[in-house]
Amino acid sequence: TGVLKPGMVVTFAPANLTTEVKSVEMHHEALQEAFPGDNVGFNVKNVSVKELRRGYVAGDSKNNPPKAAADFTAQVIVLNHPGQISNGYTPVLDCHTAHIA
C-alpha cells in the first residue's frame, strides 16, 4: 500500500534489486502517480526483464522496503484434493501471481 511515482527508488523482493522508476502508466497513458488499487504498468532503469520474476514485490526503498519473511503462519484450505494428504506431501502454493511447488 502506498504511492508509486516516476523518480521514486524501489526495491524488488525477494531479489533485493534496487532501481529508479522511469515512468508509470495506465492504459498506455502516463501518470504522475499511482495509488493502491490502480492497475498500472511501470518502467524501471537498468534492470533486465530476466532479473525479475512473477510474484516479486516492489516497494519504496526508503520507507519500509519489502523483504523476504523468515517464516509465516497461514490458514490453508484444501480444495478438491483427490486422495489423502500424508507426511511428505508437497502442495502447490498460489499467492497473488506466484505459483510455487
Image (cartoon, rainbow, N blue to C red):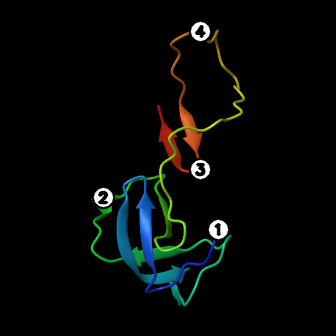
Query: Which label sits on residue 86?
Result: 4
Q: In this image, 49 relative to 27: left or right?
A: left
Determine the secondary structure under disc 3: loop
Q: In this image, 66 relative to 20: left or right?
A: right
Q: In this image, 50 relative to 3: left or right?
A: left
Residue occupied by mark 3 = 96
Q: Mark 4 touching mark 1, by CB under 8 A?
A: no
Whole-number angstrom distance, CA of label 3 to CA of label 4? 26 Å
Q: In this rendering, which labeled residue sits more in front, label 4 or label 1?
A: 1
Determine the secondary structure under disc 2: helix
Q: Nearer the viewer, residue 86 or 71?
A: 71
Residue occupied by mark 2 = 51
Q: In this rendering, which labeled residue sits more in front, label 2 or label 1?
A: 1
Whole-number angstrom distance, CA of label 4 to CA of label 2? 36 Å
Residue occupied by mark 1 = 1
Q: Neighbour class for label 3 at 10 Å: few (<14), some, many (≥20)?
A: few
Q: Neighbour class for label 2 at 10 Å: few (<14), some, many (≥20)?
A: few
Q: Neighbour class for label 4 at 10 Å: few (<14), some, many (≥20)?
A: few
Whole-number angstrom distance, CA of label 1 to CA of label 3? 15 Å
Q: Quarter-wise, where is residue 7 in the image?
A: bottom left
